[in-house]
Image: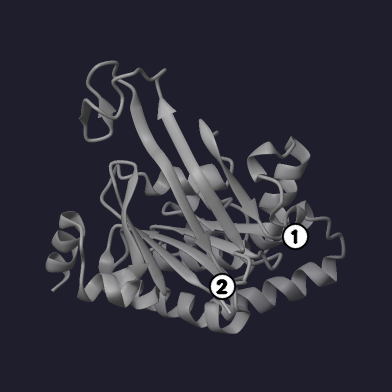
Amino acid sequence: MRLIEEPVLKVDSLTVRYGDGCAACGQYMEKNRCTACGTIWAARALSLQVYHGEVLGVVGESGSGKTTLMQSLYFDIEPTGGSAYLQAFHGGARSIWTASAAERRRIKNNLMGIVYQNPAMGLRMHYSAAANIAEKLIAAGVRDAGQMTSRAIELLDAVEILTSRMAEAPVTFSGGMRQRVQISKALANNPSILLLDEVTTGLDLSVQAKVLDLIRKIKAQYGISILLVSHDLAVIRMLADRTIVMLDGRIVESGLTDQILEDPQHAYTQQLVHSLL
């Protein structure tokens, strides 16, 4: 039961600020900027949990803090404060942000996978699709060439990339195919959680639908937990079990996705839902 289930990922009071802050921060704010000292609060006391096999959607406008959350979890930026716990890292008893450099590499290579909005951030664009997957496997300690090849074939098949193209570089692929190669690379080492950051932004509608359908199939096949960030509530509606709504670095509403869509409480969420109808 959910009451006793431990979350795969737990974030407590994540805070990311740019500036020293002052006593007026929080009182004199222009969106997420303090008008007194100029400090930018990219994330303010964010707390969330993701459970096994669940998709948690994170929705909000540009600048709301969604990408800051993802970048903090994947060590791309260093938080100002807060803690984050992975059940697969010391049984969830120690924050990943206290990890050493070697431990952080292990977390990124073995316990987490990420798919960026821009495939160039997650792929080596001039390496072959298979080599991109092999790179992730090598980073986790795999050295058997046959094992790497078979794993690449398995994953590329799962994301519907023809094995006849596995020797081709992503630079020659379409945007949707690049995202699918990113997804296969992120899944290489069976991570406990997959971070998806605006994975359909910039894609044609027909390609978006294919990528979203692929994510749904992967969730069903692998039972993986997913943190899904999007500014598009239609994407969240299709995939997320629960959803948090962010605005100006804060969580302003959270709940079951159906509940948020049918009975939004916060004015910003109401605006989002109205735009979807």
Q: SS for tag 1?
A: helix
Is residue 103 depicted above or below 212 in this figure? Answer: above
Image quadrant in which you'd find residue 181:
bottom right
Residue 9 appears in the picture as rendered: yes
Mark 2 lies on residue: 3
Image quadrant in which you'd find residue 209:
bottom left
Q: Position of residue 174 (x, y in %)?
A: 41, 65
Q: Nearer the viewer, mark 1 or mark 2?
A: 2
- Residue drawn at x 75%, y 49% as measured from the top left: 106
Would residue 172 appear left or right of 167 to someone viewing this image? left
Query: How many labels, in total?
Result: 2
Q: Which residue, as the protein is rendered here, is positioned at the far front?
A: 3
Would residue 139 appear left or right of 7 to someone viewing this image? right
Q: Position of residue 185 (x, y in %)?
A: 62, 63
Q: Residues within 10 Å of mark 1 (few under 14, many from 20)?
A: many
Looking at the rendered structure, the kind of residue marked 2 is: Leu
Along the line of sight, the residue nearer the viewer: 59 or 34? 34
Distance of mark 1 from mark 2, alpha carbons? 35 Å
Q: Which is nearer the N-term, disc 1 or disc 2? A: 2
Image quadrant in which you'd find residue 140:
bottom right
Mark 1 lies on residue: 137
Q: Which residue, as the protein is rendered here, is positioned at the far right?
A: 144
Looking at the rendered structure, the kind of residue marked 1 is: Leu
- Residue drawn at x 71%, y 46% as measured from the top left: 94
The quarter of the rendered structure image containing the C terminus is bottom left
Q: SS for tag 2?
A: loop
Would residue 165 appear left or right of 138 to someone viewing this image? left
Q: Position of residue 227 (x, y in %)?
A: 48, 62
Along the line of sight, the residue nearer the viewer: 234 or 188? 234
